[in-house]
């Protein structure tokens, strides 16, 4: 097969030209970065797990009528996606205080918020993805007021879906980040969920023990990241259950 043409390489993924116009191939790397890439490592198996987990969440969203870029998984590390024009914002939804919010407001991590809170960061590595008010977003034309309202509504629907799915497997969804892109159909423009949804972009705590099952394991050196992501995948049925000890779970198709 002909080598794919690389379109873009980010910290955790590579985008290649897709087989048809309007499509891309998204390749999940094993690279892990945190604190704006000041901390870096290669975590064997992370890319394979995130490919599966993002497939799982995006398929679920597609099935309940929240459009996403996901078309189909191609292999262990690659998925076919729709090409979008990414809106340069990280859309963050928080159910419990953690991370930058807990720090900014001096709140204890894990404090339940009075209601889910949606916030936006401007995607710019040089600036460290600063938190921005909605006023900036419309003033600088990153998105219109109508787009913004739709993005908030979409983010809250994603939150309801993700919270429910995770609660079903004994995991609390503390917060998460999504990215949203535009697709054009003639004169018609639509917003769809893009990028990835995985434990790299969520905070996931075990309901019983509070154990962290997300990228904070890497950020804060709390243990083995692949083990944490494998546990999430196993509970969601993306991996077969293993009964014995020491047996490495194998990925199912
Ligand atoms: N997040 C992300 N990418 C980023 C920043 C944040 O996926 O560049 C996710 C992060 O994993 C968490 C949520 O967004 O689930 C909120 O992150 P926060 O603002 O607390 O930032 P952090 O503490 O990760 O710097």
Image (tube, rainbow, N blue to C red):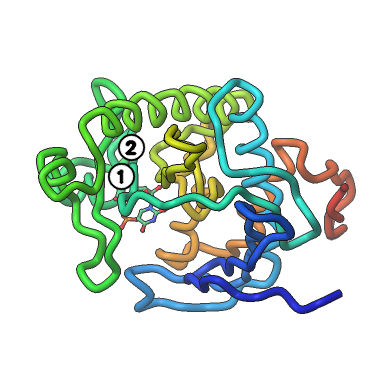
Using a 10 Å C-alpha cutoff, classify the residue at mark 1 as few (fewer than 14 neighbours), some (14 to 19) or many (20 or more).
some
From the viewer's perspective, is residue 91 above or below residue 21? above
**As rendered, which of 246 and 143 lies closer to the eye?**
143
Indicate left or right for 219 with 251 as reference: left
Residue 178 appears in the figure: no
Residue 69 appears in the figure: yes
Mark 2–mark 1 distance (CA, rounded to whole Å)? 6 Å
Is disc 2 in contact with disc 1, using a CB cutoff of under 8 Å?
yes
Indicate left or right for 23 with 176 as reference: right
Residue 221 screen position, x and y as percent: 46, 67
**As rendered, which of 127 and 185 lies closer to the eye?**
185
- Secondary structure state at the residue bearing disc 2: loop
Q: Residue at x 26, y 28 (%)?
A: 146
Q: Quadrant of residue 233?
A: top right
Residue 79 screen position, x and y as percent: 70, 54
Residue under numbered circle 2: 110
- Secondary structure state at the residue bearing disc 1: loop
Mark sitting on residue 166: none
Query: Which of disc 1 and disc 2 is earlier in sequence?
Result: 1
| Quadrant where the image shows the N terminus | bottom right
Q: Residue at x 32, y 29 (%)?
A: 152
Q: Residue at x 20, y 68 (%)?
A: 127
From the viewer's perspective, is residue 79 above or below residue 165? below
Residue under numbered circle 1: 98
């Amino acid at each position: 097969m002909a080598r794919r043409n690389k379109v873009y390489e980010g910290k955790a993924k590579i985008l290649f030209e897709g087989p048809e116009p309007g499509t891309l191939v998204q390749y999940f790397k094993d690279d892990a970065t945190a604190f704006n890439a000041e901390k870096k490592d290669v975590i064997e198996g992370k890319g394979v797990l995130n490919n599966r987990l993002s497939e799982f969440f995006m398929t679920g969203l597609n099935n309940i009528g929240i459009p996403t870029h996901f078309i189909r998984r191609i292999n262990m590390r690659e998925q076919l996606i729709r090409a979008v024009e990414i809106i340069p914002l990280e859309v963050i939804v928080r159910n419990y205080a953690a991370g930058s919010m807990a720090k900014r407001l001096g709140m204890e991590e894990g404090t339940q918020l009075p209601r889910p809170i949606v916030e936006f960061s401007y995607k710019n590595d040089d600036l460290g993805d600063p938190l921005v008010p909605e006023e900036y977003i419309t003033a600088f034309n990153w998105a219109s007021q109508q787009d913004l309202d739709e993005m908030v509504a979409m983010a809250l629907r994603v939150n309801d879906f993700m919270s429910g799915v995770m609660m079903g497997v004994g995991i609390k969804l503390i917060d998460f980040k999504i990215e949203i892109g535009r697709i054009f159909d003639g004169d018609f423009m639509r917003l769809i969920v893009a990028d990835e949804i995985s434990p790299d972009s969520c905070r996931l705590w075990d309901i019983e023990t509070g154990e962290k099952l997300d990228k904070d394991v890497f950020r804060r050196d709390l243990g083995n990241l692949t083990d944490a992501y494998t546990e999430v995948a196993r509970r969601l049925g993306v991996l077969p259950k293993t009964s014995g000890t020491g047996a490495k779970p194998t990925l199912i198709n």
